[in-house]
């Protein structure tokens, strides 16, 4: 299976990394076959399906039909069979020198080919074809488009229990996806706060467990999870160092968390660097080799060196003038 991912432009590297992480979660042999500005191509040789709805920083996902020089796109399209139904074709320039009038002409030419076999419907088509033009033309059949209203509808202020320091659901979802946990795996957030990370993991079909030092946060997270229909969560009050004892024999596939910053989030006087060190100790005791610890922090210099983990990815995400979150992905050796 070959897929084209139409990426968000909100970050230079995070959207592609998120898509590749989910690809690797469902197919270890997933590989990149195409990389263009705003467009990623992934081949999953072992899979005929993909958890399309998981991605936060992807606008749309398309089944890859073919790539070819623009000059022969008309000829190539004539050999493609799309099935029954009305069709809409759109062209998007992703870095070529294609002018506006040339784009319109190409759209008309290729749309005419499809019009020979299908009814054209530009508003509510049964089939959507996308043409991405760089030095070549890359054609895809649209499988899913992101429902931006759904993600926006889960903003922290819309939940029953609210805290202003909670991650936006889009960023929380990306953190979970970077962990490479497959649907049905278990995600632990040991600083769960109001449950934003657990909500996104639960909505993606994962089993979730969370803890917090403050009992009010644990109960608030429970309210929020139940609000979104996530009723099987394992939630408990715990200091970070006691999480392995509290969670018992439950297997954990990844630890994903927005770690305390020592600003608005309470640390009860403990230095943030020491908390981070204890986080690594807890993660090491819970995760097997190859499993991931994904952390959002405000200052990566405070993250300790730990022999059990290696840093595999990092991303800088500016939230506002006084806050930049650093997303750091560690893998257990």
Image (cartoon, rainbow, N blue to C red):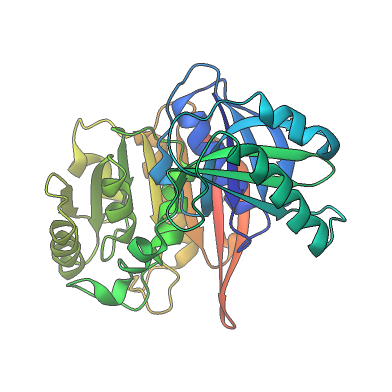
Above or below, 240 relative to 43: below
Quarter of the figure that contains the N terminus: top right
Q: Is residue 135 left or right of residue 51?
A: right
**Residue at the limit of the structure toward the right, as seen here:** 97
Q: Is residue 22 left or right of residue 305?
A: left
Q: Residue at x 70, y 51 (%)?
A: 108
Q: Is residue 320 left or right of residue 12?
A: left
Q: Is residue 236 left or right of residue 91?
A: left
Q: Residue at x 44, y 68 (%)?
A: 271
Above or below, 152 relative to 246: below
Q: In the picture, residue 156 is in which quadrant?
A: bottom left
Q: In the picture, residue 150 is in which quadrant?
A: bottom left
Q: Position of residue 54 (x, y in %)?
A: 40, 45
Q: Position of residue 283 (x, y in %)?
A: 39, 41
Above or below, 88 relative to 148: above
Q: Residue at x 52, y 48 (%)?
A: 120
**Residue at the limit of the structure toward the front, as seen here:** 116
Q: Residue at x 45, y 32 (%)?
A: 291
């Amino acid at each position: 299976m070959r897929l084209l991912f139409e990426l968000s432009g909100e970050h230079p590297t995070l959207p592609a990394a998120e898509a590749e992480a989910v690809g690797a979660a469902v197919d270890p042999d997933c590989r990149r076959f195409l990389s263009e500005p705003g467009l990623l191509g992934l081949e999953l040789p072992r899979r005929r399906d993909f958890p399309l709805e998981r991605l936060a920083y992807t606008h749309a996902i398309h089944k890859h039909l073919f790539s070819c020089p623009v000059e022969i796109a008309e000829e190539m399209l004539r050999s493609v069979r799309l099935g029954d139904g009305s069709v809409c074709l759109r062209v998007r320039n992703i870095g070529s020198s294609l002018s506006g009038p040339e784009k319109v002409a190409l759209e008309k030419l290729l749309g005419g080919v499809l019009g020979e076999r299908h009814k054209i419907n530009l508003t509510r088509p049964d089939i959507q074809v996308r043409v991405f033009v760089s030095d070549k033309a890359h054609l895809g059949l649209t499988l899913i488009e992101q429902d931006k209203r759904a993600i926006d509808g889960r903003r922290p202020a819309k939940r029953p229990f609210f805290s202003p320091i909670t991650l936006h659901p889009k960023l929380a979802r990306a953190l979970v996806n970077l962990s490479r946990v497959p649907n049905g795996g278990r995600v632990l957030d040991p600083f769960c706060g109001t449950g934003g990370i657990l909500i996104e993991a639960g909505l993606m079909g994962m089993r979730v467990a969370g803890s917090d030092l403050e009992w009010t946060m644990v109960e608030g997270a429970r309210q929020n999870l139940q609000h979104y229909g996530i009723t099987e969560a394992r939630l408990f009050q715990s200091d970070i160092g006691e999480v392995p004892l509290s969670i018992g024999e439950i297997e954990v596939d990844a630890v994903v968390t927005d770690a305390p910053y020592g600003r608005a989030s309470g640390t009860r006087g403990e230095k943030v660097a020491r908390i981070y060190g204890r986080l690594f100790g807890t993660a090491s005791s819970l995760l097997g080799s190859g499993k991931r610890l994904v952390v959002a922090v405000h200052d990566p210099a405070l993250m300790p060196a730990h022999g059990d983990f290696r840093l595999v990815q990092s991303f800088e995400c500016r939230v506002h003038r006084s806050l930049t979150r650093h997303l750091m992905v560690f893998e257990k050796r």
